Amino acid sequence: MSSANYSRTFDPRMPTGKNLYFASDFHLGAKSYASSREREDRIIRWLDLIKNDVAELFLMGDVFDFWFEYKTVVPKGYVRFLGKLAQLTDAGVKLYLFKGNHDMWMFNYFTEELGASIISNELAIVRGGKTFYLHHGDGLGPGDKLYKFLKKFFRSGVCQWLFARLHPNLGVGIANAWSRKSRIAGAKDVKKIQHQQEWLEVYSKEILETKHYDYFIFGHRHLPLDIALPGNSRYVNLGEWVNHNTYAVFDGENLELKWFEKATK
Ligand SMILES: [Mn+2]
């Protein structure tokens, strides 16, 4: 519809009456088929709600609890979700899929099928004169040296090539067992956040010392957060869709964190 007349990565203009939407950590596939399907249906209700005013959709990582693309084969499932995304992108919505720590093995399938931009690390954009720093949120800030090492390894071509050699019954089985270890930490009490320990806040403040952004948007923490930073900047964490069903919307002037079908806020 209206996406052809503005740049995909850098453009201060916003199409009139349209919004940017941000969400992350759907963890589709977890924990059971039934709970994942229920969540998938909820996500589709949300996408139906926004379909007429979304210009760009940013799904910021861990959309899938596990994802891998073999040369000619992709994991089963998620057909309603993927069909809905196709409907949106066919109608001109620009889709960004960020690699999370659970679905870092997205290659070219979604680019070919959905025209999605796959974002490996951070994405900096300007929309409506506001600057955004976007990242899934894994492997940033102080600490977690083991994960940072593993992330490098998992993202290496050698590791991906070796994994693709395993029979999927074995490979995906191992991956699901691994994925289960780090899933949905379940921190539900947003009010207990200690700001000096919220490492994405610490990380955002470090960046602000050298470069200003109006909004830092992350996922990964599974905590819906909207925290004021120095210089009128904000750190927004998108939460997740197992307990919170949270997303952010930017209308060209303001960014707002919202709850969809308010569950357990
Ligand atoms: Mn994550």
Image (tube, grey):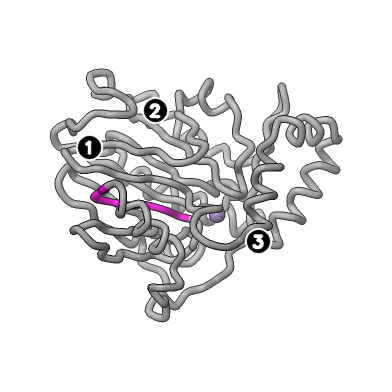
Tell me which amino acid carries mark 1. Arg
Q: Is residue 179 left or right of residue 241?
A: right
Is the residue indicated by label 2 positioned so its CB lies within 8 Å of ligand 1? no
Query: Judging from the image, what secondary structure is the residue with disc 1 in?
Result: strand
Q: Is residue 24 left or right of residue 162?
A: left
Tell me which amino acid carries mark 2. Thr
Q: Are marks 2 and 3 in contact (CB under 8 Å)?
A: no
Mark toward the start of the polypeptide (3 vs 1) = 1
Magenta region? 212-219
Mark toward the start of the polypeptide (1 vs 2) = 2
Q: Which residue is mark 3?
A: 182
Counting other residues with Cα less than 10 Å from the Cα at mark 1, is it few (<14), some (14-19), or many (20 or more)?
A: some
Q: Is residue 82 left or right of residue 133?
A: right
- Residue 227 is one of the magenta-drawn residues: no
Q: Nearer the viewer, mark 1 or mark 2?
A: 1
Is the residue indicated by label 3 positioned so its CB lies within 8 Å of ligand 1? yes
* Residue 77 placement: quadrant: top right
Q: Position of residue 199 (x, y in %)?
A: 46, 64
Q: Quadrant of the C terminus?
A: bottom left
Q: Nearer the viewer, residue 137 or 179?
A: 137
Question: In the drawing, what numbered circle is on residue 89?
Answer: 2
* Residue 6 placement: quadrant: top left
Q: Nearer the viewer, residue 67 or 8?
A: 8
Tell me which amino acid carries mark 3. Ser
- Residue 216 is one of the magenta-drawn residues: yes
Q: Nearer the viewer, residue 145 or 245?
A: 145
Query: Judging from the image, what secondary structure is the residue with disc 3 in?
Result: loop
Counting other residues with Cα less than 10 Å from the Cα at mark 2, is it few (<14), some (14-19), or many (20 or more)?
A: many
Q: Which residue is mark 1?
A: 127
